[in-house]
Image (cartoon, rainbow, N blue to C red):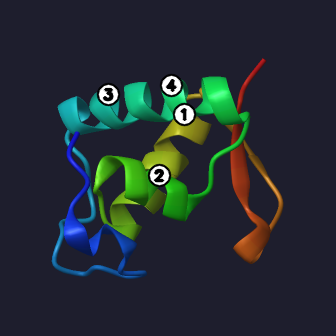
Amino acid sequence: MEVKPNAMDARNRELPTRLTDQQFETCWKTAKAFLAENKKIRNQQLREITGIGYDQAIAFFNRAVTEKRLLRKGVSSGTHYVLKD
């Protein structure tokens, strides 16, 4: 997935909030590869490597946690995600 120039924008409202199933799976593969090397991932890191927007990243992480693919750790700006054992 190509990183978009505005991926660093904290709250890019131009992108839709939801991810399609295909977009979710593409992001999941990218996030899983990142986690294999880094052990944890934050919202901004996901946006940088996938090019999705802030709200899309929130939706991605909520779905991944609900599906028990990731565990949420920390709170607020310290929130990060790890692979579920």
Residue 67 coordinates in the image, percent (x, y): 54, 29
Q: Earlier in the sequence, mark 2 or mark 3?
A: 3
Residue contact between numbered discs 2 and 3, judged by CB atoms under 8 Å: no
Instruction: Classify residue 13 by image quadrant.
Output: bottom left
The residue that mark 3 highlights is: 25
Say what amino acid the circle numbered 4 marks. Answer: Ala
The residue that mark 2 highlights is: 46
Q: How many marks?
A: 4
- Determine the residue located farthest toward the top in the rendered image: 85
The residue that mark 4 highlights is: 33
Q: Earlier in the sequence, mark 2 or mark 4?
A: 4
Secondary element under disc 2, as helix, strand or loop, is helix
Q: CA distance from mark 2 to mark 1?
A: 9 Å
Instruction: Classify residue 5 by image quadrant.
Output: bottom left
Indicate which label's residue lies in the foreground, 3 or 1: 1
Indicate which label's residue lies in the foreground, 2 or 3: 2
Secondary element under disc 3, as helix, strand or loop, is helix
Residue 38 coordinates in the image, percent (x, y): 69, 36
Q: Is residue 36 left or right of residue 82?
A: left
Quarter of the N terminus within the rendering: top left
The residue drawn where x is 83% and y is 60% is 74
